[in-house]
Amino acid sequence: MSILHTVNKSPFERNALESCLKFATDGAAVLLFEDGIYAALKGTRVESHVSEALGRLKVYALGPDLQARGFAETRLIEGVCVVDYAGFVDLAAEHDQVQAWL
Amino acid sequence: MSDTIEVDGKQFAVDEEGYLANLNDWVPGVANVMAAQDNLELTDEHWDIINFLREYYEEYQIAPAVRVLTKAVGKKLGKDKGNSKYLYSLFPYGPAKQACRFAGLPKPTGCV
Amino acid sequence: MSEVVKKFMYLNRKAPYGTIYAWEALEVVLIGAAFDQDVSVMFLDDGVYQLTKGQDTKAIGVKNFSATYRTLGDYEVKKIYVDRASLEARGLSPDDLVEIAWEDFETEEEIENIVEVIDSARVSELMNESDAIFSF
């Protein structure tokens, strides 16, 4: 049973990411989009949580949302993969279900 | 005000205040038709301001309020044009409101 | 128009695009600028993300209003503050932020960048000095 978790809220404003990382089990995927992409950036207060999670989870960030907010891929934590909208759809199709952390 | 205006045989949607519904629909003929409805004939001086407004919107994503327009026109087109007397002589219904409408822009931000 | 000049602070604490707050706040600031009051705009917490350079919203299909912040100087909004601690918590530096210029068209006096990065103690002080704080 493999789940794609999605987080679209800023990690500095809501605890959606924190809960997601707590409950996502090994091998699951986490897609950060909209204001959720701020968690994928280097040098933030939450970077260590994401880095640790990368050891057991796949973490993706939605490219169009990074661009919209002015961040190049070079600003991402190492190991975070960028996907476009088609990639988002593929991820949703590849997993048994999608869990949205609103 | 009707909900569309006709320009060169084509219909263009406008809102209840006569502003073009879709910025990207704009063609110069829109300005001419709107001006004719206001009993104005557009001169090069009018077009300087209309084109200036379109450039301003393209760069900053807003239609400027009248005093901001006045300052910005003064900087770009010269102090003799950057005053409200001159701009009102061209656009008697208000330089920002009327000129923005001709330019296909939304109603100016900060127009009180 | 009132003769008493009040100190108004617009407090921005939300990231752009994810919610409508940032754009709504900016519109209110620009509209309110017509009233000739003593206006300051404060960017705090996720609000600092509103000012990041290089925003390009083509792919998400929403209006890119990051360029609109650069008109604040034209609207005579000259006091723009960013909380340093909020930047640091997000791995950002002042170089990541857009610059907003101001120019006096009469005297041609010019300030290249009116965005000021300040410490939290100064943020509190400015809040205390305000007559009214509009929170977004």
Image (cartoon, coloured by chain):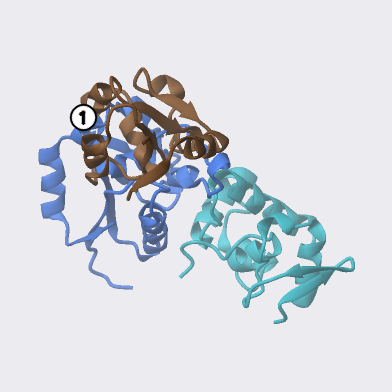
Determine whether, in the image, residue C112 is placed left or right of residue C92: right
Check the residue under mark 1 and report the chain it is in: A
Determine whether, in the image, residue A54 is placed left or right of residue B94: left
Q: Nearer the viewer, residue A37 or C78?
A: A37
Residue B74 place in picture, x, y as percent: 58, 49
Depicted A75 relative to depicted B50: above or below = above
Image label count: 1
Q: Nearer the viewer, residue C95 or A9?
A: A9
The residue under label 1 is A45
**Judging from the image, what secondary structure is the residue with disc 1 in?**
loop
**What is the three-letter code of the residue carrying label 1?**
Arg
Q: Quadrant of residue B91?
A: bottom right
Depicted A27 relative to depicted B66: above or below = above
Q: Nearer the viewer, residue B56 or C109?
A: B56
| Residue at (41% x, 43% y) in the render | A97
Q: Is residue C93 visible?
A: yes
Give the position of the N terminus of chain C as an image quadrant. bottom left
Q: Sort mark 1 into few (<14), some (14-19) or many (20+) by Cα contacts within 10 Å.
A: some
Give the chain coloured blue.
C
| Residue at (60% x, 67% y) in the render | B97
Colour assigned to chain A in the rendering is brown
Determine whether, in the image, residue A47 is placed left or right of residue B12: left
Query: Quick one: which residue is furthest to the bottom in this view?
Result: B1
Give the chain coloured cyan.
B
Query: Quick one: which residue is furthest to the right in this view?
Result: B9
| Residue at (41% x, 40% y) in the render | A33
Give the position of the C terminus of chain C as an image quadrant. bottom left
Residue B33 place in picture, x, y as percent: 80, 69
Q: Quadrant of residue C4?
A: bottom left
